[in-house]
């Protein structure tokens, strides 16, 4: 049996294709362009669970009314270096892009800026937003709420979101450090992918509805995700929740509807962005970040290891390869994406 040929799409064409699909689904042209940039760059950097591959799910939200196509996020409160953005049900990528830029502008004026968001939807990979600010020369940290997926240590059942957290740090002469992770051992997108492919999960990712460990991805629907390091990951997820919902006045994770089936009104998710102008501290922060990174990469290798990298190194290499050679999709994935365009 022959192996299906992969589908290779140049990055500019994929961005244009994605924006066209989003606009056809009811997104205002500017919102479609912003979201397409986030989704395509995320895919190009190798984070397939949060990139263009999310279009089928997003399409279901747009059709149900969970996403407002012509929403324009706006700053509704400011106080010194602090601001609040009301998303008005916009795509999370649109709301988050607006908010992190406001935070960056505040950092330029005050040395740091913190912006929270309410009334938003799923924002995709938080790493994108901290990366863009780090490319502007700022240190950035991001958090987001999410529908409940994790249990509390010692408990069972879904109680809190998995605490998406990211940071980006600019370096002299090197691409930024970019760290992006949820506080659960496994990501929801990867569990969904495993279920679609008929694969089992690694041990320690999820518990079933009765609180027992399982490797069956279908058990995640009524079960819960295991926090990284149990109480450690849970504590960090609780911080993400407090910053992205309690400060913003956004909907608490426990009150959010599940991602599927799609709700008929916006999710009401919250995000938070802290942006810092490192040059205000008087040290050569970018140069020192590069020197520290070189020390990390130069550390002794353990047996069987080929290299030590800093967060973001491999994603940067994947992005450069995608810009040069195009983004590669397997035939089944591209067929699912084309089906969204055909059914719009």
Image (cartoon, rainbow, N blue to C red):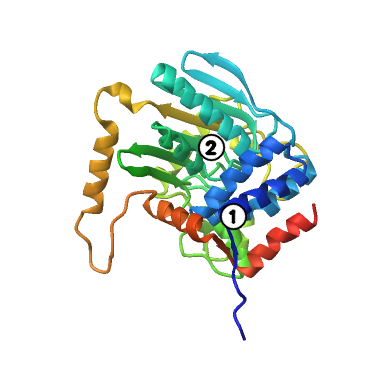
The tag earlier along the polypeptide, 2 or 1, is: 2
User: 83 and 261: which one is in front?
Assistant: 83
**At 60% across and 59% down in the image, what residue appears?**
192
Residue, disc 2 = 144
Figure quadrant of residue 68 = top right
Q: Do the residues labelled 2 and 1 touch (CB within 8 Å)?
A: no
Tell me if residue 342 can be seen.
yes
Return the mark for residue 155: none
Task: Give coordinates of residue 2: x percent, y percent.
Answer: 61, 83
Q: Nearer the viewer, mark 2 or mark 1?
A: 2
> Quick one: label 2, few (<14), some, or many (20+) residues within 10 Å?
many
Image location (x, y in percent) of residue 101: 52, 28
Compared to residue 268, the image places residue 337 above or below, namely below
271 relative to 131 in the view: left or right:
right
Q: Which residue lies furthest to the top in this view?
A: 79
Image coordinates of residue 125 in percent, x first then y, are 53, 45
- Of all residues shown, which one is farthest toward the left? 300
What is the C-alpha distance between the residues marked 2 and 1? 22 Å
Which residue corresponds to mark 1? 223
SS assignment at label 2: strand
Within the image, what quadrant is residue 161 found in?
top right
What residue do we see at 67% from left, 37% from top? 31
58 over 275 or under it: above or below: below
């Amino acid at each position: 049996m022959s192996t299906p040929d992969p589908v290779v799409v140049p990055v500019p064409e994929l961005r244009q294709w994605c924006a066209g699909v989003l606009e056809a689904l009811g997104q205002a042209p500017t919102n479609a362009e912003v979201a397409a940039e986030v989704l395509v760059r995320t895919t190009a950097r190798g984070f397939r669970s949060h990139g263009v591959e999310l279009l089928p799910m997003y399409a279901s939200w747009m059709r149900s009314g969970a996403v407002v196509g012509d929403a324009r996020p706006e700053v509704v409160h400011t106080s010194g270096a602090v601001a609040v953005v009301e998303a008005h049900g916009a795509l999370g990528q649109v709301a988050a892009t607006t908010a992190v830029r406001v935070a960056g502008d505040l950092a330029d004026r005050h040395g740091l800026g913190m912006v929270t968001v309410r009334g938003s939807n799923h924002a995709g990979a938080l790493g994108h937003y901290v990366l863009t600010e780090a490319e502007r020369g700022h240190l950035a940290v991001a958090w987001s709420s999410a529908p409940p997926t994790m249990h509390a240590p010692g408990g069972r059942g879904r109680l809190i979101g998995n605490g998406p957290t990211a940071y980006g740090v600019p370096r002299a002469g090197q691409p930024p450090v970019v760290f992006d992770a949820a506080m659960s051992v496994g990501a929801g997108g990867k569990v969904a992918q495993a279920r679609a492919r008929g694969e089992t999960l690694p041990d320690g990712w999820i518990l079933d509805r009765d609180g027992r460990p399982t490797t069956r991805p279908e058990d995640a629907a009524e079960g819960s995700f295991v926090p990284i390091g149990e109480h450690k990951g849970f504590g960090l997820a609780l911080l993400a929740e407090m910053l992205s919902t309690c400060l913003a006045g956004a909907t608490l994770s426990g009150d959010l509807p599940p991602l599927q089936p799609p709700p008929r009104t916006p999710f009401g998710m919250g995000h938070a962005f802290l942006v810092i102008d490192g040059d205000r501290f008087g040290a050569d922060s970018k140069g020192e970040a590069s020197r520290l990174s070189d020390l990390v990469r130069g550390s002794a290798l353990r047996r069987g290891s080929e290299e030590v990298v800093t967060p973001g190194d491999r994603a940067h290499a994947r992005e450069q390869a995608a810009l040069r050679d195009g983004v590669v999709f397997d035939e089944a994935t591209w067929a699912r994406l084309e089906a969204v365009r055909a059914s719009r």
